[in-house]
Amino acid sequence: MGVANLLVVDKDMDEALVRAILTTIFDNKPDLEKVHAEAKNLTLQSAVEGSPIDFHAGAIAYYKDKGVWKK
C-alpha cells in the first residue's frame, strides 16, 4: 500500500515555493507520520514514481538535487 496523498500545485506556482514545500514535507516526515500513518510509506524514491500528471519544474529540481529523479 502506498501513499495516495498526491500534492498538486498550479504549473505557474513559483519553483522556489514548490521546492520549499517539498523540503518541509521531507525534513519533517516524522511529524507528518504522527498525523497520517500512511506517511511512513512516503520516500523520496516513491514520490517520483507513478504520478498520473506531469511534475512541476520545482519538484523536478528538488528531486534532482536529492538524486532520485531518473526521467
Image (cartoon, rainbow, N blue to C red):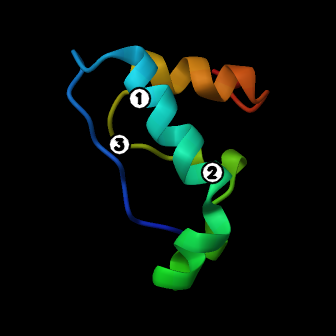
37 relative to 40 in the view: left or right: left
Residue on which the image places disc 2: 26
| Residue drawn where x is 72% and y is 21% of the image | 65
Residue sitting farthest toward the right: 67
| Residue drawn where x is 54% and y is 46% of the image | 24
Give the number of the mark in front: 3 or 1: 1
The x, y position of residue 9, in whole percent, is 26, 35
The x, y position of residue 8, in whole percent, is 28, 42
The x, y position of residue 53, in whole percent, is 32, 35
Residue on which the image places disc 1: 18
- Mark toward the start of the polypeptide (1 vs 2): 1
| Residue drawn where x is 32% and y is 16% of the image | 14
- Taking the image as drawn, is residue 63 in sight? yes
Q: Describe the element under mark 3 as helix, strand or loop.
A: loop
Q: Residues within 10 Å of mark 3 (few under 14, many from 20)?
A: few
Mark 2 residue type: Phe
Among the 4 quarters of the image, the one containing residue 30? bottom right
5 relative to 2 in the view: left or right: left
Tell me the quadrant of the picture where the N terminus can be found. bottom right
Q: Describe the element under mark 1 as helix, strand or loop.
A: helix
42 relative to 50 in the view: left or right: right
- Mark toward the start of the polypeptide (3 vs 1): 1
Mark 1 residue type: Val
Mark 3 and mark 2 in contact (Cβ < 8 Å)? no
Q: Residues within 10 Å of mark 2 (few under 14, many from 20)?
A: some
Mark 3 residue type: Pro
| Gap between marks 1 and 2 measured at Cα | 13 Å
Mark 1 and mark 3 in contact (Cβ < 8 Å)? no
Tell me the quadrant of the picture where the C terminus can be found. top right
Label drawn at residue 52: 3
The x, y position of residue 66, in whole percent, is 75, 30
